[in-house]
Amino acid sequence: MMATMTASAEATVSSQPKMTARDVKVFYGEKQALNGVSIDVHTDLVTAFIGPSGCGKSTFLRCLNRMNDTIDAARIEGRIELEGHDIYAPDMDVVQLRARVGMVFQKPNPFPKSIYENVAYGPRIHGLASSKAELDAIVEQSLVRASLWNEVKDRLQDSGTALSGGQQQRLCIARAIAVDPEVILMDEPCSALDPIATAKIEELIDDLRGRYAIVIVTHNMQQAARVSQRTAFFHLGTLVEYGDTAEIFTNPREQRTKDYITGRFG
Ligand SMILES: Nc1ncnc2c1ncn2[C@@H]1O[C@H](COP(=O)(O)OP(=O)(O)OP(=O)(O)O)[C@@H](O)[C@H]1O
């Protein structure tokens, strides 16, 4: 399998990471799900989280915008910073944080509202537009960036839920983009999509790289190799290896990484 993978070309790394995580541990009640994860996330790079089911990828992803706050049993230790600020500090506004660190889920989840309203909702509640014309411009720009504008520009008042699965996922990406995020977290964004819709999302991720720091959880190793420049391999709650995607797939340092990418377990 390794020989057929083509990892994306190496990208330049900006000197300052957008987000840093240090020694992050997560507990669900008594059970420890993450054993001290440290990682940097850069704007110029797409970071992929890979690893077998239950290894803690989604748990860690959710730490990055405090989605775990919504799970009563979850408790987190360690430190996560966005632009040098502790996102778990008491004065952190979680609503603002989730606009700055947006999220796209496994199953496309547009609101049962029009395409326009799906995208306009966030900018409206965050007061990002002072007129209808400004809001229209944000909606258009977000849909353009999400590679959906040409398909929907003549039907903005149709329901978002009437779109195809792939279009719905791009609508969800447009919705995240509309509030001008710095980071976009994607939790297996293609797992409910067919290969053509998946290819469009992968292309889109590449287009968005550099404008937003992107972190993607994926079960699909070829996808990680195609879309990311950094890969983090998780196993049993531990970050086993984190580094340049091409290196991880062609010359992993750890035996466990090697075993996983060659299909020996997972
Ligand atoms: N809400 C929760 N309550 C209790 N335990 C949880 C909860 N969510 C996850 N876990 C446990 O934490 C561990 C890590 O799960 P997580 O979903 O983060 O793994 P994952 O690598 O994303 O898996 P998958 O690829 O299957 O989505 C697992 O043992 C899981 O059972």
Image (cartoon, rainbow, N blue to C red):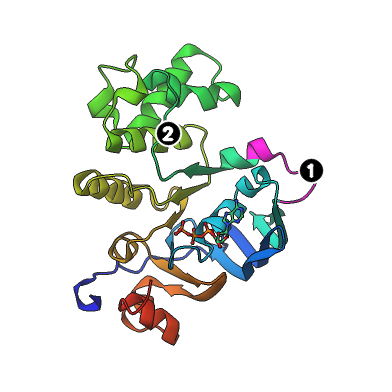
Q: Which residue is mark 2?
A: 109
Check the image and report above or below for 144 versus 210: above
Magenta-drawn stretch contains 79: no
Check the image and report above or below for 74 versus 142: below
* 173 or 211, nearer to the observer: 173
| Amino acid type at image mark 1 | Asp
Check the image and report above or below for 157 versus 139: above
Locate the N terminus by quadrant: bottom left
Locate the C terminus by quadrant: bottom left
Q: Residue at (71%, 62%) from the top-left corner?
A: 79
Q: Is residue 222 visible?
A: yes
How crowded pointer 1 is (Cα within 10 Å; few <14, some 14-19, many 20+) is rated as few
Q: Which contiguous range is marked in magenta?
A: 88-96
**Numbered label attached to residue 91:** 1
Quick one: which residue is furthest to the front in this view? 30
- Taking the image as shown, residue 25 lies to the left or right of residue 106, namely right
Q: Is residue 253 visible?
A: no
